[in-house]
Amino acid sequence: MIRVASLRVNYGRREALRGVDLHVARGELVGLCGPNGSGKTTLIKALAGLLSAASGTIEINGADIATLSHRERALRLSCVPQRTEVPAGFSVRELVLMGRFAHTGLLTGFLSDYGPEDHAAVEAALRDARADNLAERQAAELSGGEIQRVLLARALAQGREVLLLDEAVSALDMARRVEAYDLLATLNKNGGTILSALHDLNLAALYCPRLVFLKAGLIALDGPTTDIFTESNLKDIYETDIRVAAHPVTGAPQAHLVPGAVAAALG
């Protein structure tokens, strides 16, 4: 489904990804984790075709994305960015409807070009992303958390087969984060392939059966969450004292930070 081979991406003279190899099979829900600057956003942007590779290849369903048009990429995958500029003058419903652009087959993209199937997809996306109550609001007037829900809805309206997310719940409160990942789990159960970059390790461990950790532009760990989510691994990656204990309800491993003064006292 998603296959990355020897991927290198540069920002000027800085090498942000230094030879990444990754395979995400159809129907997987994978969490992409790692410290700030490790390359998570760069990898998501490269997969979405928003950044060019210095070398290496990215394939989606066997097609090299470098050979695909913007429309062809949009028909194969959807992406929820970390942050984006929301255009003024559009309602939430209109902004979500823009996610259907690739499906119209038209060059204009005017809102009047969309048909009943597009509008039905928008209504379903708004409902699933818990953004239907925002539909008539002006998108530019929304809070950060509300905007993230709308961007998720736009991605769902575009397509649900392959979904990339870059810190897509970072501005949401705890209840909305759970709602969002409950939705992702349902999409995954229904056959969707999801790669989600996130800083919230405990949320990742609760929902993602497989985790990939980046550090300094390389994959440091990749495997089943229950195998690699350990104190020693997390300490190596994040370079701080972390303790891991089982979730009291689900049993999933959960990370607990240790304050510096306490860690020093413990030796």
Image: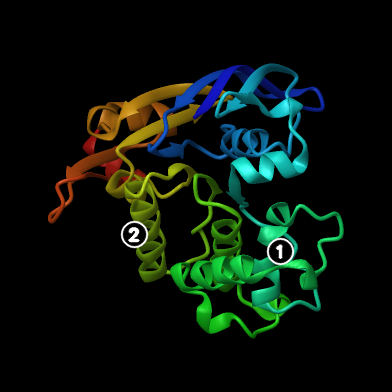
Q: Position of residue 83 (x, y in %)?
A: 66, 57
Evaluate whether residue 259 shows in this view: no
The disc placed on residue 20 is none
- Res. 99 visible in picture: yes
The three-letter code of the residue at mark 2 reads Asp
Write the residue at 17% across / 51% down.
247
Q: What element does badge 1 sit on?
A: helix
Rendered location of residue 156, percent (x, y): 54, 58
Judged from this view, the residue extending furthest toward the right is 108
Q: Is residue 154 above or below residue 197?
A: below
What residue sits right under mark 1 in the picture?
98
Tell me, for residue 182, which label it has, or none: 2
Residue 152 x, y percent position in the rendering: 55, 61
Q: Sequence-wise, which precedes: disc 2 or disc 1?
A: 1
Q: Residue at x 56, y 32 (%)?
A: 38
Q: SS class of the residue under badge 2? A: helix
In the displayed structure image, the side of residue 133 where residue 44 appears, left or right: right
Taking depth in this image into account, of 160 and 227 the one nearest to the observer is 160
